[in-house]
Image (spheres, grey):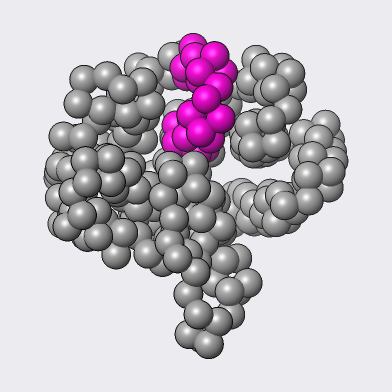
Amino acid sequence: MNASFLFNLVLFAISAYMLYRIFMLTGRQKSNRKMLEILDQFDDEQRFFESADQFIETGKDAEFVQKVSVLRLWGDTFYEKDEDFKKHLEELNIDTLLNPDGKKKGFSQNEDSFFYLYMAIPNRLNYRKAEGFRKLLDEKLAACDEANAKVLLKKIYEENKKYYENTDDRGRAFMESFLEGEYGGYKYSKQLIGLYKNCEEALLAKMYEEENNTERLEECMEEIKTFGTKTRLGIRWLKEVGLSYPEEPEEDEDTDAEEDEAETEETETTAETEPEETAEAEEKEPEE
């Protein structure tokens, strides 16, 4: 083989790979849009479940079928469809989320789904005092303990269980250090770290409220004010934790609430990240 032929062969291989990447990313974007459309229907119980069921039954992308299955499991939790929750939890294939196409990079591109499994669903179940269902979820997630050993969400999940079960220090030491930026060595999405901090600060605020620690409570509430008043996810989370803000006067509302909610919900629930966008905390400045 001469040098010219080898050079052309390399160029062909690079071009083929780039076309493949474009094709794959286009497919993910299309599936992601469909998933967002389903999520947008969440407040309409019947439409949400009909759309989710249809996607799961007819979907050809195994990875996104499981992502929508996680959203449906969240719906089962929220709308207290307990028999469906048990059935759908058993059917859920977490390995497909962790290893789509056998490439073992799934967590970084499916961290939004694990947010529901590790944080949103357990918090709702705790709010409902559905301890038995939290135990079932714990058993399901045990299958990926090893794979997610260095994942920040899993660490948060373990510490939040102390809060829900009123054991040890209720996760307080971790929450306080986490909010100080001490989460070195854990994998996390840079797009979602702010959401995690808001959720953990709300749990801390509840502990400060129970201790009548007014100063620390006010500091926490000021930090999560936008989260707890302007986003659907945040409003639900604070309600579940048992915290609330007084309603602001109508004349002070100078933003389009619907646009704000839609933008935030998309960011918080469907962050599409490539492996290189999932950070090791000690390699970057902590995000305050």
Q: Is residue 169 above or below residue 182?
A: above
* Residue occupying the point 49% across, 69% down: 247
- Is residue 149 toward the left or the right of residue 172 in the image? right
- Coordinates of residue 182 in the picture (x, y in percent): 15, 43
Q: Quadrant of residue 218?
A: bottom left
Q: Give yes or no for residue 134 being in the magenta stretch.
A: yes
Q: Give yes or no for residue 223 being in the magenta stretch.
A: no
**How many callouts does the rendering have?**
0
- Is residue 176 toward the left or the right of residue 150 in the image? left
* Residue occupying the point 70% across, 36% down: 79
- Coordinates of residue 16 in the picture (x, y in percent): 57, 51
Q: Quadrant of residue 148?
A: top left
Looking at the rendering, in which quadrant would you find the N terminus? top left
- Coordinates of residue 232 in the picture (x, y in percent): 56, 57
* Residue occupying the point 43% across, 19% down: 144
Over which residues does the magenta segment extend?
114-141
- Coordinates of residue 269 in the picture (x, y in percent): 53, 50
Q: Main secondary structure of the magenta part?
A: helix
Q: Is residue 91 above or below residue 151?
A: above
- Is residue 254 toward the left or the right of residue 92 in the image? left
* Residue occupying the point 53% across, 49% down: 236
Looking at the rendering, in which quadrant would you find the C terminus? bottom left
Whether residue 285 is visible, yes or no, is yes
Whether residue 17 is visible, yes or no, is no
Judge by depth and name the residue closer to the eye, 226 or 192. Answer: 226
Judge by depth and name the residue closer to the eye, 119 or 235. Answer: 235
